[in-house]
Amino acid sequence: MKSITILGIFVADLAFFGKIPLKGETVLGDKFVMGPGGKGSNQAVAAGKAGANVNFISKIGNDDYGKMAKKIYAESNVGIKNLIVSEEHSTGVAAILLNKETGDNAISVIIGAAGALTIEDIDAAEDEIKNSSIFLTQLEAPMDTVIHALKIAKANNVTTILNPAPAAKLDTEVFSLIDYFTPNETEASFYAKKNIVNEEDAKNSSKELLNLGIKNVVITLGDKGVYFENKDESHFVPSLRLGDRVIDTTGAGDAFNGAFATALCEEKSIKETLIFANTYAGISTTRIGTANSMPSREEIDKLL
């Protein structure tokens, strides 16, 4: 069976709902929710719930937050053969501020145990990476481990996806390791060195990103949709029209990436893949939480 390997971090999400305070401002919140998070972890859960055979590479602490991670993976069909439990480091946490009226968010992450991932840890997972159809990663794990894993995948003809979040400077060689580059509009603006907010901006900037050596550019544009371009074709897929059903956009990008990897693994066409991932991400915004908001495959199949 074709499989997906994902490298990333797990953190416990501590979400505070209410007005996002200005600098120096104290506000009274409306609600507090705790749950599993971390971009790589969220993407693994999304892929698992979307029907993929997925393995997650990460490191957690031997603590209550680590137990939370194992619980969501067991519930979401995520393989944890290469999930390392550290006795020396605590599991990471993320403080998330959410505007309950707009769904906008601001996030501060303490990576914790996952920040102690090493190249040796990646080497221990080499067989999993080599035998995968898709390798997906982000930029939250230590950079040397991300690049090392991408090199292993590329050397073994595994399709690679880099979700460049958080945006960080990358050496030229890294771009040549990427088959699919999946920034949101903020991250794409960082790499294109121009402001990207809509389809036209994405279209005008994609060729510059392709010129870096990337084969396929996929720019997510929030509630506007997603833009795709490679040397042969381009597509724009608008977001679902959900209106006031949107209550929490945290993790929507992770939902998109996990579903995108799943659809690629199933050898859907690129247009079908974009529609599948866009739909999956849209549904996730109608629920509170990140990993806990990921829909099941049955929910997606009913809409497509």
Image (spheres, rainbow, N blue to C red):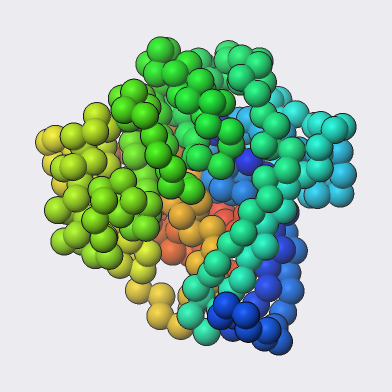
| Front position in the image: 199 or 134 | 199
Query: Residue at 73% across / 47% down in the picture?
Result: 92
Direction front: furthest residue: 24
Tell me: 45 left or right of 104.
Answer: right
Quadrant hosting residue 27? bottom right
Quadrant hosting residue 61? top right
Q: Residue 255, position in %: x, y?
A: 50, 53
Q: Residue 140, position in %: x, y?
A: 56, 42
Does residue 14 appear in this view?
Answer: yes
Query: Residue at 40% across / 18% down in the picture?
Result: 154
Q: Residue 135, position in %: x, y?
A: 47, 29
Q: Residue 1, position in %: x, y?
A: 51, 23
Tell me: 63 left or right of 183.
Answer: right
Quadrant hosting residue 21? bottom right
Query: Residue at 37% across / 64% down in the picture?
Result: 222
| Front position in the image: 90 or 227 | 90
